[in-house]
Image (cartoon, grey):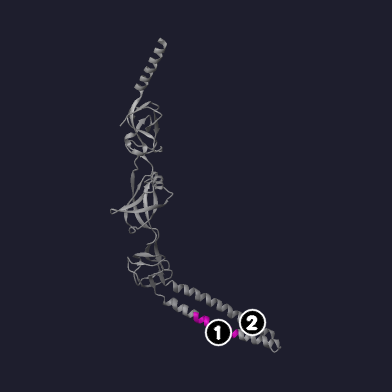
Amino acid sequence: MLPVLLAGLFAVMSQAVIAAEATPVRVARLNTIAVYPAHAAPATVVSGSEAELSAELAARIIAFPPAVGDVVDKGATIARLDCRDYELALAAARADLAELEARLDLAERRLERARELTARQSLAVEVLDERSAERTVAQAQIAGARARIERDAVAVSRCVVTSPFRAALIERLAPLGQYTAVGEAVARVIDLDDIELSAQVGADDVAAIEATTSLDFVTGGRRYPVSLRVAVAAITTATRTRELRLRFTGTHPLSGTAGELEWRDARPHVPGSVLVQRGDALGLFVVTDGHARFTALPAAQAGRPSAVALPDDALVVTEGQYGLNDGDSVELLED
C-alpha cells in the first residue's frame, strides 16, 4: 500500500514542479495584431515622351500657329517655314517632266515610223537603232525627273514642322523670322497621352511595392491611384535608390507635379513591442504545443514593426516574452 501512496505523491509533486516551471505569458493570434505599415517616397509626374522638334531643311520661320501652353493634336502644325525656293524647285521639276514626256511621245512615234520603213527596206537599220536609243534616253530622263519631283515634294513637306503626338507646346526654341539650319530645334513639346509617375524608392522597398495592391500618388491633399509599370534595373549609387515608373489608373495631375508615392505593405508586420533580443538575433516567440519557440527575424529593427512569414493563426507572445528562452514551457494567461 505504501508504494502506491508514494507513487501518487510523486506524480502530484512532479505536476506541481512542471506547473511551477511554466512561464505565464499572454498571446495573440497574428491576424489580430498584424499591422500593414504605410510608406512614402518622393515622386514627380512626367511625360513619357518629351520632344524637341527640329527643322529638316534650312529656311526662315514665318509662322508659329500655336502659342506656348496651347494643346495641339497629332500632326498639327507647330511651325511653318518659308518654302518658296523649294516650291519653285518642285514646280520646275514638274515642268521638266512635262517636257520630257512630250519628247518621249515624239521619240516613240519616230521609232514606230522607223520600224515601218525598215520593214519595207526604205530605211537603213542604223537609223532604226538611233530612234530606239532616242526613246531609251527619253525614258531615262523621265525617270530622273520623277525622282527630282519626289525629292522636291519631300522638301516641301518639310516646310511644316508638325507634332508627332497630341501635345502641349511648352517652349519655342527659335524666334519668329529666324533662319534655321537643318536639325536646329525650333520647339519643345510634351506628350499629353503618355503621362506617368517617376518615383525614387529605397532599393529594399521594391519587393514590397511589387507585392502591394495599394499604390497612390499624393499631392495637394489629393490621391491618384497608380500601378507599377517597371522598376528600373539599376541602383543609384549615391542614394541607394531605384527609379520606379508607374501608370495612372484614372485621372492624373499635370506633368511636373511633385508629391509622394504612398504604398501600404501587403506583408503582415508584428508590432515592435513583441520583439526580443536573443544572442545576436532579434525576433519573437510563438507558442506551439505549450512551448515557446523563438523565431529570428533577420531584417527586424528594434522598436519598429517587422515583417513576418507566419500563419495568420500563429500564437505570438505579447506579454512575458522577455523572460523566455527557446523551448520553455508556458502557461497561457486568460484575458
Q: Which dot marks residue 133?
A: none
Lateral position of residue 228 relative to residue 141, left or right: left
Q: Locate residue 172, reporting x and y percent.
A: 34, 66
Q: Nearer the viewer, mark 1 or mark 2?
A: 1
Residue sitting at 52 percent across and 82 percent down? 98
Three-letter residue code for mark 1: Ala
Residue sitting at 61 percent across and 79 percent down? 136
Q: Locate residue 152, reporting x and y percent.
A: 48, 75
SS state under label 2:
helix
- Work out whether residue 322 or residue 287 is closer to the camera in this orientation and state it: 287
Residue bearing mark 1: 102
- Cα–Cα span, label 1 and label 2: 16 Å
Residue bearing mark 2: 132
Give, as a single range, the part of the protein colored magenta. Answer: 94-107
Three-letter residue code for mark 2: Ser
Residue 55 in magenta stretch: no
Image quarter in which the N terminus is found = top left
SS state under label 1:
helix
Q: Locate residue 132, reporting x and y percent.
A: 64, 82
Residue sitting at 50 percent across and 80 percent down? 94
